[in-house]
Image: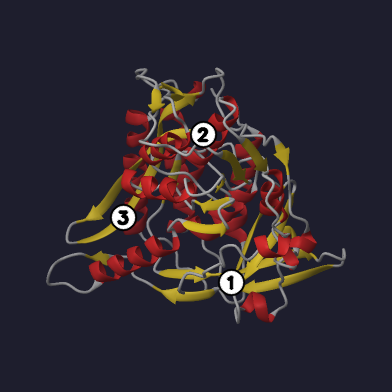
Amino acid sequence: MFPETARAVRFLAVVSLLAALTWAQQPQQPQMSSFERTRALDILQVISSDVKKHYYDPKFHGLDWDQKTAETKKQIEAANSFNMSMSHIAALLDALNDSHTFFLPPQHAYHHDFGFQYYMAGDHCFVTRVRPKSDADTKGVKPGDEILGINGFAVNRDDLWKIQYAFSILRPQPGLRLQLQDPSGAQRNVDVIAKIRETKRVTDLTSSGGSDIWDMVREGETEEHLMRARYFEVGDQLLVLKVPEFSFTMGEVDSMIGKARKHANLIVDLRGNPGGAVDTLKYLLGGVFDKEVKIGDRKGRKDAKPEVAKPLHNPFSGKVVVLVDSKSASAAELFSRIVQLEKRGTVMGDRSSGSVMEARDYEEHSGADTMIFFGASITEWDLIMADGKSLEHVGVTPDEIVLPTAQDLASYRDPVLAHAAESLGVKLSAEDAGKAYPYEWPPQ
C-alpha cells in the first residue's frame, strides 16, 4: 500500500473544507439525485480505467489502484453533492503525486473571475495584477500585496496550485477571503466576490442545434491572440522574446529566430509559461543551438527512443539568457535546463515549478448530440535528462536568482528583465522593463 504523503493529506484537507464552506452569496445546493450519483460513478469508472491503461508506471509507485478506486467509489456513494463526488475523483488521481496526472471535471454552468492574479516569488505569494473596476479593485486589493492566506489556508509554494485547482475548477467559489499584507507590512482581511457569467454545462454541437460551436471558435480566437509570441527590442543590441506557451509551428519559431538574428543578444522570457507541445520545444531549441541536443530519455511502460532536437537552418548564434519563475513548467523547464547543461546561456529568475513529465489528455464525454465533457491528463512518460536526473518535483534552479519585491510589483517594475539585459551589456531600467509587453486582460 502506497503511504499517504503529506501532499495528498493537504489536498484532501482542501477537499474536506470545500464541503463545509458557507458563503452568504452561495445558494443551498440540493441533495445529489440518483441520476447524478450514477453519473459520478460512471465518470469514476472511466477515469480510473484510463489511468490503469495508460499511466507510465504500471505499478503506480506501489499504490493499490483498484483498492483506491474502490475506496473512492464508497466515498461517492456517501457524498451529498455531485461536486463533492468530483473532488473525490480528483483526490484519487492526486494520490499518485504526479504533476501531469489530474482530473478534468465536467465544466460548470458558469465562468467566474475574481479580478486579480497572483503567483509565488521565492517563498512569498504576491498579487501581480488587479482587473480595473472588479470587486478586488473596489475593495483595495493592489499589486504588491502579499497573500498570506486564502479561505483560511496558509499559502505556500507546494500547496498554492492545489488551492487554486480546488477553489477555481473543482468547486468554484463565489468569493475568496484573503489575508493580505501590503508592502509596508500592514495586514488586513478582504472578502473578494467573483464576477460570474453563466455558460452552458451541456454543449450543443449539432448543426441544427445552436451557436455553441461558434462560441467555442470565438473563444479559441481570443485565446490565440492572448497566447501569441511578443517582442521587445533595444536597438540592434537586444531582442526579448516572450513565449507564453509552447504551441507554435516550425514556421512560427523560424520567424521568431529570424527576428532574433538581427540582434546581438536574445532573452527568452519563459516566465509564466506552462509548457505545451514537445515539437515546439524541439523547434525553439533548434533555433538557438547549432548542433543536435538531447532533451531526455523517455521512461514509460515501454522505453522509447531519446527525445532530441535538431538545429534549424541558420540558428541564432548570439548570447542567450532565459528567464523562468515559479509558474514556468514542463517544456519551459526542459528548455531552460538544456541551456544550462549545454552551457549555451544563463538562466535567471526564480526556481521553476518542477512539473516535468510527458502526458496526454484523455477526453471523455457523456451523452450523444448533447454532451457533458470530462477527462484526465495522464502521464505516459517520465523524462530523464542528460545528467541522469528528472526535474519532476525539483524544478530548475537558475544560475542567478533574481526576484521582484513587493515594491517592484506595486510600481510595475521588472527588475528581473532589467538585470538580464544588464548582464548582456544592455541598459534597461526596471521601469522600462515593466512596460515591455503591456498586460491584456481576457474578456469576461
Numbered disc in front, either 2 or 1: 2
Q: Secondary structure at mark 1?
A: loop
| Residue that appears at 37% across and 53% down | 37
Front in this rendered view, residue 319 or 262 = 262
Residue 42 visible in the snapshot: no
Three-letter amino acid code at the position of disc 2: Leu
* Amino acid type shown at disc 3: Phe
Chain-order first, disc 2 or disc 1:
1
> Few, some or many C-alpha atoms within 10 Å of disc 2 (few <14, some 14-19, many ≥20)?
many
Drawn side of residue 195 relative to residue 76, left or right: right
Closer to viewer: mark 3 or mark 1: 1
Q: Position of residue 111 (x, y in %)?
A: 45, 69
Tell me the SS state at disc 3. strand
Q: CA distance from mark 3 to mark 1?
A: 27 Å
Residue on which disc 2 sits: 334
Within-10-Å neighbours for mark 3: few <14, some 14–19, many 20+: some
Residue 391 vertical placement versus 85 (above, below): above
Image x and y of residue 437, in percent? 56, 63
| Residue 6, quarter of picture | top right
Tag 2, which secondary structure?
Answer: helix
Looking at the rendered structure, the kind of residue marked 1 is: Gly
Please identify the quadrant where the N terminus is shown: top right
Alpha carbon distance from label 2 to label 1: 32 Å
Q: Please tell me how crowded label 1 is: few (under 14), some (14-19), or many (20+) other residues with Cα within 10 Å.
A: many
Residue extending farthest to the left is: 208
Q: Position of residue 327 (x, y in %)?
A: 59, 48
Which residue sits at x=23%, y=74%? 211
Residue at image coords 43%, 38%: 287
Q: Is residue 423 visible?
A: yes
Does residue 92 appear to the left or right of 4 in the view shown? Answer: left
Q: Which residue corresponds to mark 1?
A: 115
Q: Which residue is mark 3?
A: 373
